[in-house]
Image (spheres, helix red, strand yellow):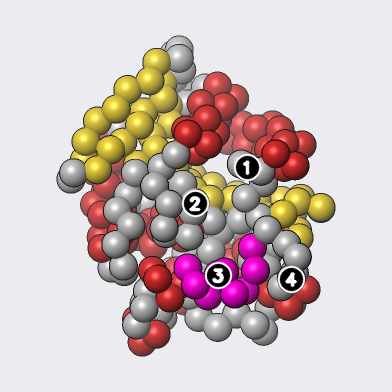
């Protein structure tokens, strides 16, 4: 595998290329719209490239308030869609999945893949998972409210920044959902609305891709993802 870095509109992009790649995955990392691309996300990208046989691009998108990150991610995704070899997969986890979903209408990928995605910024306390896992879990409503307030401080703008409310359809899409996560029901709602395939991991918590106790679920994802990508 080869690793390289480039710059797009002033931001770093890490590219992980396996031998004889069979396509490209553009992966937007999670972190509450507040954490730069770190070694844990790059390590995940390496494992993903090795498991899928596809080149993985990891953009270190800007962390300014909305709409700046969305505009950058949309420009980057559009650039990728017009310049990279396919089949092309648009992907991400958590807040990165949210940014990817917001960018999706700019160019339709061959497939899309999202892990514990944030799908809406609107009040979500009607979702049972928001109440069931509000205390003592990896992501709390209080922390999520902090992230949303930082990312999109104007409540009036949050409808426009919520892909669950804005999307009219999805390409073939896989949603991997941590069952023990306040965001679980958001992803189930997205799957039902648009016919996405959903895999729910019982016992998994948010950010299992980078948590030490999430290793069994990370291993499972590295089996499930290439299996799904290789389906006709």
Residue furthest to the right:
203
- Please tell me the numbered disc located at residue 144: 3
Which of the two discs, 3 and 2, labels the residue nearer the N terminus? Answer: 2
Residue 200 percent across, percent down from the top left: 74, 54
The residue wearing badge 4 is 135
> Is disc 3 placed on a helix, strand or loop?
helix
Residues in magenta? 139-147
Which of the two discs, 4 and 1, labels the residue nearer the N terminus? Answer: 4
CA–CA distance between discs 1 and 3? 18 Å
- Please tell me the numbered disc located at residue 30: 2
Relative placement, left or right, of 35 versus 207 is: left
CA–CA distance between discs 2 and 1? 10 Å
Q: Nearer the viewer, residue 156 or 172?
A: 156
User: Which quadrant holds residue 179?
Assistant: bottom right
Residue 215 percent across, percent down from the top left: 72, 36
Which of the two discs, 3 and 4, labels the residue nearer the N terminus? Answer: 4
> Is disc 2 placed on a helix, strand or loop?
loop
Up the image or down, 6 lies above or below 90; here it is: above
């Amino acid at each position: 595998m080869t690793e390289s870095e480039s710059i797009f509109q002033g931001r770093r992009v890490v590219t992980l290329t396996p031998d004889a790649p069979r396509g490209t995955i553009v992966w937007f990392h999670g972190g509450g719209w507040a954490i730069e691309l770190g070694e844990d996300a790059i390590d995940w990208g390496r494992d993903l490239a090795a498991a899928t046989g596809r080149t993985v691009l990891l953009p270190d998108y800007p962390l300014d308030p909305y709409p700046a990150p969305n505009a950058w991610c949309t420009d980057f995704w559009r650039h990728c869609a017009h310049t990279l070899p396919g089949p092309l997969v648009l992907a991400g986890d958590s807040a990165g999945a949210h940014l990817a979903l917001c960018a999706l209408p700019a160019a339709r990928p061959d497939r899309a893949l999202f892990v514990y995605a944030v799908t809406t910024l609107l009040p979500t306390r009607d979702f049972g998972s928001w109440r069931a896992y509000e205390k003592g879990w990896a992501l709390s409503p209080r922390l999520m409210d902090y992230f949303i307030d930082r990312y999109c401080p104007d409540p009036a703008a949050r409808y426009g920044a919520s892909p669950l409310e804005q999307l009219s359809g999805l390409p073939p899409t896989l949603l991997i959902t941590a069952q023990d996560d306040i965001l679980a029901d958001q992803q189930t709602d997205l799957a039902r609305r648009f016919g996405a395939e959903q895999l729910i991991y019982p016992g998994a918590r948010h950010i299992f891709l980078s948590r030490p106790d999430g290793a069994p679920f990370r291993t499972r994802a590295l089996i499930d993802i290439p299996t799904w990508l290789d389906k006709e």
